Amino acid sequence: MIKKIGPTEIGPRHRATCHCGAVELELSLPDGIVDPRRCDCSLCRRRGAIAASVPLSGIRIVRGQEHLRLYQFNTNTARHYFCGNCGVYTHHQRRSNLEQYGFNLACLDGVNPFDLGAVPVMDGVNHPADREGAAE
């Protein structure tokens, strides 16, 4: 659990926005930042974001629902959301745990993800759901 990143305290409710501000989220982070990580799948390595986890109930779209765009690929299980105006990835429903969202740490107000230091990388290239016969 991470309660502070650089000079920014992570509150139990923390605001997150895309770059242009059209999309605003409220995240429920009572335990701070949980399980921050990068992924090396074909999409994540291109977007380069650090994602952390919240339950599905942990994200509320305050404004900008109409600006969110959905992108899915491969098994079409994960649901990746980004702002249709500025293109910034805000969050996604994980395929590894459909009860969780991953959210873009860099969208949190006051947070510079480079202040986090080294972040674990998950093996998205060899995701268990991609193995022959694996259940999604």
Image (spheres, rainbow, N blue to C red):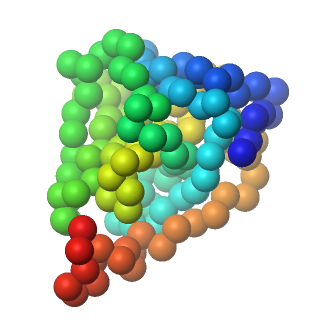
**Residue in the picture at 32% in, 35% down:** 82
**Residue in the picture at 45% in, 41% down:** 55
Q: Position of residue 36 (x, y in %)?
A: 61, 51
Residue 130 picture quarter: bottom left
Q: Position of residue 49 (x, y in %)?
A: 51, 48
Q: Is residue 62 above or below residue 5?
A: above
Q: Residue furthest right?
A: 7
| Quadrant where the C terminus is found in the figure | bottom left
User: Which residue is at the front of the view, 7 or 9?
Assistant: 9
Query: Is 3 displayed left or right of 73 in the figure?
Result: right
Q: Is residue 121 above or below residue 103?
A: below
Q: Position of residue 26 (x, y in %)?
A: 48, 20
User: Which residue is at the front of the view, 27 or 66?
Assistant: 27
User: Which residue is at the front of the view, 69 or 58?
Assistant: 58
Query: Is 50 displayed left or right of 43 in the figure?
Result: right
| Quadrant where the N terminus is found in the figure | top right
Q: Is residue 20 visible?
A: no
**Residue in the picture at 62% in, 46% down:** 34
**Residue in the picture at 29% in, 73% down:** 129
Q: Is residue 14 visible?
A: yes
Residue 128 picture quarter: bottom left
Q: Position of residue 71 (x, y in %)?
A: 22, 46
